[in-house]
């Protein structure tokens, strides 16, 4: 999972939350993910190459959890 340093999602400590809930998932903080328009408007993260975003940081975190669960289930099979 990747997060831009300047993204609105950083209002909450997503890195600590995700890494504590999903020890197999690495959260990479990047200076820029080249989605400046989205980054300035909505909290988002990249989960295995897919943009996951929402209107609030908490809502985005919920969608990120869902996407991580989907990815983990896919690779568990």
Image: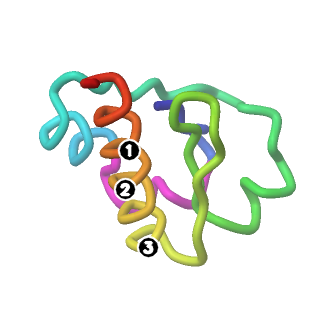
What residue do we see at 38% from left, 71% from top?
58
Instruction: Classify residue 61 as left or right of residue 60.
Output: left
Span colored in magenta: 7-14
Q: Position of residue 55 (x, y in %)?
A: 59, 77
Mark 3 or mark 1, which is nearer the start of the sequence? 3
According to the picture, the residue beneath numbered tag 3 turns out to be: 59
* Pick the front one: 63 or 12: 63
Write the residue at 32% across / 39% down. Answer: 15
The quadrant in which the C terminus is found is top left
| Residue at which label 2 appears | 66
Query: Callout 3 environment at 10 Å: few (<14), some (14 to 19), or many (20+)?
Result: some
38 displayed left or right of 74: right
User: Does residue 51 lie above or below 33 as drawn?
Assistant: below
Closer to the eye: label 1 or 3? 1
* 3D distance between C-alphas at marks 3 and 2: 11 Å
Give residue 70's position: percent from left, percent from top: 38, 44
Q: Are marks 1 and 3 in contact (CB under 8 Å)?
A: no
Q: Name above or below for residue 40 compared with residue 20.
A: below
Checking the image for residue 35, the label placed there is none
Q: How is the image coloured?
A: rainbow
Rendered residue at 63%/39% (across/down): 50
Question: Of residues 36 and 69, which is closer to you in this image?
Answer: 69
């Amino acid at each position: 999972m990747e997060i831009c340093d300047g993204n609105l999602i950083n209002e909450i400590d997503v890195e600590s939350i995700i890494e504590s809930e999903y020890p197999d998932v690495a959260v990479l903080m990047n200076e820029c993910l080249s989605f400046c328009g989205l980054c300035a408007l909505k909290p988002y993260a990249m989960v295995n190459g897919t943009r996951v975003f929402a209107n609030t940081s908490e809502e985005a975190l919920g969608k990120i959890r869902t996407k991580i669960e989907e990815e983990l289930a896919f690779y568990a099979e």
